[in-house]
Amino acid sequence: MSTNLSHLGNDDVEATARLMSASQRLLDEAARLFPLAVAQNERTMWLEAMIDEVPDYLYFKDRNSRFVVANRAVVKDNRREGTGGMEGLSDFDLHPEHVARGFFTIEQEIIRTGRPRLDMEELVRDANGRMKWLLSSKLPVRDAAGEVVGIVGIARDITERKREESLHLGQAHLLKMIALGAPLAEVFSSLILLIEAHIPDVTGSILMLAPDGRHIVHGAAPNLDPAYCQLVDGLEIGPSLGSCGTAMWRGEPVIVTDIETDPLWENFKALILPYGFRACWSSPIRSYQGKVMGSFALYSRRGGEPSAECMKLVGMAIHIAGIAIERKEAEDSIQFMAHHDTLTGLPNRSMLDERVASAIEAADDAGGTMTLAFIDLDNFKLVNDSLGHHAGDELLKIVAARMLRCVRASDSIVRLGGDEFVVLINGAMRKGENVEDRLSAVREAIAEPVEIEGRSFQVTCSMGVAAYPEHGRNVTELLARADTAMYRAKEIGRDAMQVFTAELANRAHEKLERQEELRRALARSEFFLQYQPQMDLSTGRIFAVEALIRWRHPERGIVPPGDFIPLAEENGLIGPIGDWTLRAACRQNKAWQDSGLPPVVVSVNVSARQFQETDWVERVATALEESGLEARYLELELTESLIMQDVQQAVETMHRLSQLGVHLAIDDFGTGYSSLSALKRFPVGRLKIDRSFVKDLPNDTDDAAIARAVISLAHTLQLRVIAEGVETREQIDFLREAGCDEIQGYYLSKPIDARGLQAILCIPNL
């Protein structure tokens, strides 16, 4: 077999130049002298001695491609010593017919055309049966008349070079497979076959360590009996588990030269000896950081130790195998992170669609159903705020683990984000069990006491449930309806489970319509303000007014704030609505002052969302600047619960507002959960007693005691006290006697428009 490589690259030309450096000079001289020798039928001793010293093949053939002269290298490799040499033989006497035919055709072409053939790669089998690659050049030999009388040839053994090239190409192919994400089994099989092709009489095997770091996982062994591989799969590594299990356990190569007698194989030799293997050489496969990930082994049919060349190839193999395993682990990790929550390890939102689609398909095939439950932890923010986000994260992990214990392998728990989860109940229930029981078990598991950082507490959850196909045909519909049911569970007091109903659907639709109406109301200026006066009990003077927003609905008429403020807070419209209220109140107060009325303070309620926004103070300053109202004529009412969400941040914001000159008051005092230690830090000027403590005064002794306590506390902290919801003379008398400073309520006036309030402000004292 031959290949014409007359058009080679620079590297091959250089290699050829080196090949023929010594031999070519001899070849040129021989080509000049040979015709004379043939003509005279003589061989000179000096010519024989010269060509025999050349280590490469050097020979002369006649016009019939029969050997005339061949040097010692040709004679030796063809085992013709002592038999008369090569003279008179042709390639048909030495090689298989198809190989000899290839040589003969080329040589006859050279004789016919007189053109040499240079740098041909030829694959031959020598007399010992070994395959060899030769780099050959053949040139025509001419007589004195210029006639071609034969050829002269030279060839060098390049088997080792071809072996290295094959190895490098194999390595490149393996790395390409790894880069393209080929399955590990395919990469391992190709790697083993590459090594087996370069080491005679061995069979390769790659084993991996399971994620637990203790058990064997079959990787690949293309030429080992699958039955044997199956027996090895799943075994636990240890100090005497054959070559591979021991190599992984020790973290170092294990060379067993005789399987039959080596104690490491005592319990396993009966499995492998029937296959004809006598030695097993195994090396651990390590990660870049040095962690053992598996083993690469060669089973040999000959006993003894591996050669240095063999171990060099094994070193290359374990390096490539390590790269392949690490890349697969990295790819699996990326895939896992893309579809799972990093905190809890649960599937995330991106996997929910796939899980629900599979569950729906299974339900359709079985003619059954599938249930989706939307879970939101109640008051989870309190845990974060009181114990810190680390404790909140720990709580989420505990809750996730508890929920997983309550469901079957066919069910799913998904974390959507924050404190929201989805439970997917798939497939038929066991006899005597139903979906409600399983979901109740989840709720009960969540509500079990939790201890984090030495503190024990409980959390509950609100759960909304939707079923396929009754409540939706796809993940979007089911999730939306379970979400609707969950919010209903929160509305009825939290720690509850609510199943989606048509009534809830109608309520959700109505809620969506109201949200759109609110947006339109803001755009169409349907909101307006009413004002309720506040009176100083000691002087009877109206000193302040509270601005109260109203909605003039084009169809329903005047809508009170209790019917739309909660919705605005839920959907985020409270921010722009609150900003409009602040600007309108400041403009109106400035207008009263400009009309000559006695100056009063206008009090505006602040929502939690507004107060938490980073530019809130700047927006207050802008409203004052645009209206021209002095800051001392504006008071902002803050609720206890608003302040306590983040006390430190609240105190900082309150101080910045105070620096503007704005007054601050705590609204609905007594209904929240502020502590006295926190209260004394607040830069506020007034406390407002909630109307729930005023309405039954003076007859309710508990309310009376609470009112007196609040007034006393406020005065101790140098704060003024105003009571809201005052409707009777008896309430005024009690409050005045208890030391209350100011009142607000229907006894003075219902909320009225700016013109009506202007008339009241004209009255000197009430």
Image (tube, helix red, strand yellow):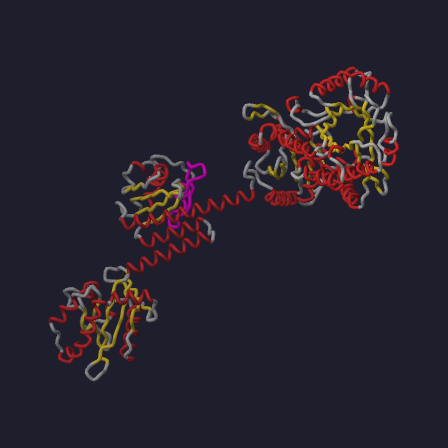
Task: Check the image and report above or below for 202 versus 704.
Answer: below
Please state, as top left, top right, bottom left or bottom right, where the C terminus lies in the image.
top right
Residue 517 in picture, x, y percent from top left = 79, 43
Question: Which corner quadrant of the image does residue 278 belong to?
Answer: top left
Of residue 652 and residue 372, the one placed in the foreground of this image is 652
Q: Please, which residue is most extreme toward the bottom here?
A: 145
Of residue 151 and residue 756, the one placed in the foreground of this image is 756
| Residues rendered magenta in the picture | 208-233
Task: Check the image and report above or below for 722 versus 335.
Answer: above
Asked whether the viewer can see residue 410, the reply is yes
Residue 564 in picture, x, y percent from top left = 78, 37
Task: Check the image and report above or below for 26 versus 611.
Answer: below
Asked whether the viewer can see residue 411, the reply is no
Residue 74 in picture, x, y percent from top left = 20, 66
The residue depicted at 72 percent of the width and 23 percent of the height is 719
Please give the count of numbered marks on the rendered protein.
0
- Residue 222 in the magenta stretch? The answer is yes
- Residue 325 in the magenta stretch? The answer is no
Of residue 69 and residue 302, the one placed in the foreground of this image is 69
Task: Check the image and report above or below for 263 versus 104.
Answer: above
Question: Which corner quadrant of the image does residue 129 belong to?
Answer: bottom left
Q: Viewed as shown, does residue 696 lie left or right of 187?
A: right
The residue depicted at 17 percent of the width and 76 percent of the height is 34
Q: Viewed as shown, does residue 388 lie left or right of 533?
A: left
